[in-house]
Image: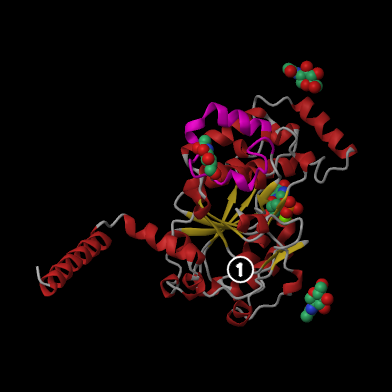
Amino acid sequence: MSNYTRYRLLLIIVCFASLLFLYYVYFTGEKVPLDVRERFFQNEYLDPQLDPSLRPIGNVRAALVVLTRNEDLTEILRTMKQFESRWNRRYNYPYIFLNDAEFNQRFKDRTSAATRAKTFYGTIPQEMWSYPSWINQTKAAEARDQMVKDKIIYGGSESYRHMCRFYSGFFFHHQLLKKYDYYWRIEPGVKYNCDINYDPFAFMQKYKIKYGFTLSLAEYRSTIPTLWDTVRDFMDEYPNLINPNNFTRWISDDDLDSYNLCHFWSNFEIGDLNFWRSEAYTKFFNYLDKAGGFFYERWGDAPVHSIAAALFLEKSDVHFFNDIAYRHEPFEHCPPEPRYHISGNCQCNVSENFDMHWYSCTKKWFEI
Ligand SMILES: Nc1nc2c(ncn2[C@@H]2O[C@H](COP(=O)(O)OP(=O)(O)O)[C@@H](O)[C@H]2O)c(=O)[nH]1
Ligand SMILES: *[C@@H]1O[C@H](CO)[C@@H](O)[C@H](O)[C@H]1NC(C)=O
Ligand SMILES: *[C@@H]1O[C@H](CO)[C@@H](O)[C@H](O)[C@H]1NC(C)=O
Ligand SMILES: *[C@@H]1O[C@H](CO)[C@@H](O)[C@H](O)[C@H]1NC(C)=O
Ligand SMILES: [Mg+2]
């Protein structure tokens, strides 16, 4: 063969290979979203702020979920005012207010006047906010007394425990949330200190993200003495429910021997409701609920959600919303990158950003 023929042959092979490659890229449809997602996690240029496709006007089946009491009216109005001007006035996602008691007319009037979006008001059904039959209430009361003596935060509170159990196991089944796929949890008094110039719900949907957070930290060990043992028992009983690509190395430093107390701070959550409605999570919650730690101890929904995410999801299913500035006393996430401060007209102080604080688990999130 002459050199010339050899080159022609090579050229033909290269052309053929390219065609095959293009065919693969365009016609193996399933693979494309994952590919996009991997690129997102590898390259900063796919920043949600810069993706124009994330600026539809609020067309995701999503809602803002606010569990609150009538007494929190002033605080929720303050939060809504800022949240509307920083974000939702451009998207108009509906608010769903939930309460264990009836909302009064003043609460409904004032909150619905604070937004152009729809507002819904729901009372929590009793079975979502009461003691299950298998709980020994004498034992629960004794445990609360002991926690008061030990000065554990909210240690004596029954309502706080119902709240934690509600957020752990029930809010996503509430009638008013039935038609939604995504939620954003908002608490009275929280602050959003930069503009958000895209639709985080659209982002979640496009990249198939299941859970989003801004702050993470360590839980008080005294509120969850037996939680980890219960989780370990669950894992022994249901090994097939654990994700082979789980990120438990974020929540355990010793190969699952113990829990390092890391959790996403759940007062901010943007999440996929269908994750909490999944079979794996349902089994997990029921298992924990049977063990009684929501009442005999003071298990929080934050460690419960976070441990579940670490077991059932993989790291790329979870997104750190770095660009969303968020404050829930006494901690704040303030994005350190100047470009967010410019695009978001931020009013937060980077030197008070909690991420690199020793008590934060966000540093570890980047390490794993
Ligand atoms: N309706 C109602 N909401 C509650 C109750 N306890 C807490 N919440 C809500 O649950 C969320 C968490 O409570 P919060 O007091 O902020 O707890 P913390 O953030 O852990 O200090 C907030 O949205 C509260 O408004 C309660 O007894 N009834
Ligand atoms: C409930 O707990 C109390 C206090 O721990 C205990 O004395 C009692 O026997 C328990 N009751 C039942 C039915 O287990
Ligand atoms: C959990 O993830 C680790 C990798 O981080 C993996 O080695 C382990 O097998 C997974 N566990 C299960 C039960 O699949
Ligand atoms: C930001 O926070 C630091 C540390 O708390 C403080 O010293 C500084 O004055 C603050 N800057 C502004 C502009 O508030
Ligand atoms: Mg709070």
**Disc 1 target residue:** 324
Q: Is residue 239 above or below residue 157?
A: above
Q: Name the residue located 48 percent from the left edge and 64 percent from the top edge.
A: 42
Q: Nearer the viewer, residue 261 or 137?
A: 261
Who's the residue at 51% across and 73% down the image? 49
- Image vertical order of residue 140 relative to residue 61, above or below: above
Magenta span contains residue 44: no
Which corner quadrant holds the N terminus?
Answer: bottom left
Viewer-proximal residue among 233 and 174: 233
Q: Looking at this view, is 192 or 351 the one in front? A: 351
Q: Is residue 148 visible?
A: yes
Residue extent of the magenta highlight: 229-258
User: From this viewpoint, which residue is outermost toward the front?
Assistant: 2
Q: Amino acid at mark 1?
A: Ile
Say if residue 198 shows up in the picture.
no
Q: Position of residue 7 (x, y in %)?
A: 16, 72
